[in-house]
Image (cartoon, rainbow, N blue to C red):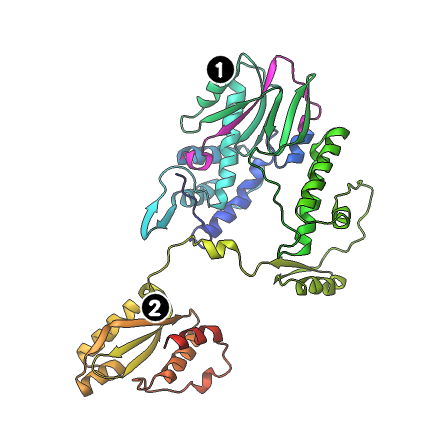
Amino acid sequence: MRPIVSFCGSPTYQLSKYLTTILQPLTDKSRHKLQSTEDFINATKTVQIPDDYKLVSFDVKSLFTSIPLQLALQCTETAIRKSTEPLPLPTDDIMDLLNICLTSTYFQYNGKHYKQLHGTAMGSPVSVVIAEIVMQNIEERALSTCRQTIPLWLRYVDDTFTAVRHDEIDAFHNHLNEQNTDIQFTREVEENGKLPFLDCLVSHNDNSLRTTVYRKPTHTDRLLDESSYNPTSHKATTIRTLTRRAQLVCDSTDSLSDENKYLHRVFTKNNYNNDFIRRNTHRPTTTTETNDTATPTTTATIPYIKGMSENISRILLPFNIRVAHKPITTLRQLLTNVKDKDEPRNRQGTIYKINCSDCQASYIGETGRNLTTRLTEHRRATRKGDVSNHIAEHHRLTNHNIDWDSAQCLTYSTDYFQRLTLESWFTNLEQTPLNRCQQVCKILEGRCVDRSVVARFEKRL
């Protein structure tokens, strides 16, 4: 099992992003690194592979969680000292900060706290750069010490495409796994002269490499349906992206024609009409052509409402304002919760209610801390007979018992003025409140309060 934890909002998240911007340029000069399918296509166009060689792809088992922290730090420091790029911080400071990010791998699951002891965190931004630095170090060491002649070595993160003499594949595989006992490779050898890599199916014919589009056996023809509740621009991009990939990957007229026919059937199956397909099919442009469309000066992100959002986009287009659509509700919001829920009494910023056990009186209060802490303070004030405390004063005058166990959180807010307004609101709903001030303060008039929150908890009361 590999823990995948979101680092968004964690104490080291911003530091991890900052280190990523510093370390990323160190990885850009590798001649083996691929950043896209287009890089792969360009790199294989002129490669000649002898007939006694076979295409092989190597993949690292669980790369991120397999990288030893000490190896990560050593490879990073070596890359920094070899680089001629100017850095904003001294090397020692960068290494200290990186060590903090790589070792602060705490997370919570089912109410318990854990720490990842081995490998880099898969949810940390800097882990991607560290993995690239480590892979570059391992591949350079492996290629410089192997006895075989390797005509090409191309890698996308942890997936590597190469060619090895057919009788030396096992020896080269073992050589890779000997570089580090924690980082182990699996392999896939070509079958019938074909090997999938990324989204390409590479064929080995007459010492050259040919490519066409590859789809996994589990692939379905399900795309973003034309009738789905999504922006029209997203549907157009679906067609444009797939037709562009066909033109990029297919290196012969016949394979491109077959792919285009296949895509047309798929688009039709997903309810796109011929006119929409024709208008949004990607058309390659030459470098000499100029783009007369003005660059948008700003971007406005709005929730998508079918029919209305498209009109807003057209209205803002003459003003060079690009509109980006976001869904109002996503499946992730409905089906998943990546973090454990806080106990109601441990949640910060609460409006709460405490009842009297012997009469109908109740007290409505607010606190920026959690309810457990505030109840402790109320109990202490009641024992001491603090006249400034409303609950303690009620107990002193009536000798009634306070029902501490039934204290409940009514709603939550991190905004102080909103909590004051909500406290007054809920106080007004009580028949016999203990609060001395039962009216909404004049100073709070005009403050914005979420009416949906008030309405939801008004029903509860």
Which quarter of the picture shows residue 98? top left
Dot placed on the residue nearer the N-terminal end, 2 or 1: 1
Of badges 2 and 1, the one in the foreground is: 1
- The residue sitting at 28% across, 76% down in the picture is 354
| Residue type at numbered disc 2 | Arg
Q: Residue at x 40, y 45 (%)?
A: 100
**Between 303 and 220, the one nearer to me in the picture:** 220
Tag 1 residue: 171
**In the rendered view of the protein, which quadrant contains the C terminus?**
bottom left
Secondary element under disc 1, as helix, strand or loop, is helix
Q: Give above or below for 61 relative to 297.
A: above
- What are the residue bounds of the magenta stretch? 43-68
User: SS at mark 2?
Assistant: loop
| CA distance separating discs 2 and 1 | 63 Å
Name the residue carrying label 2.
369
Along the line of sight, the residue nearer the viewer: 192 or 350? 192
Looking at the image, is 178 positioned above or below residue 310? above
**Residue 332 on the magenta segment:** no
Three-letter residue code for mark 1: Ala
Q: Is residue 306 visible?
A: yes
Neighbourhood count class around disc 1 (C-alpha, 10 Å): few under 14, some 14–19, many 20 upward: few
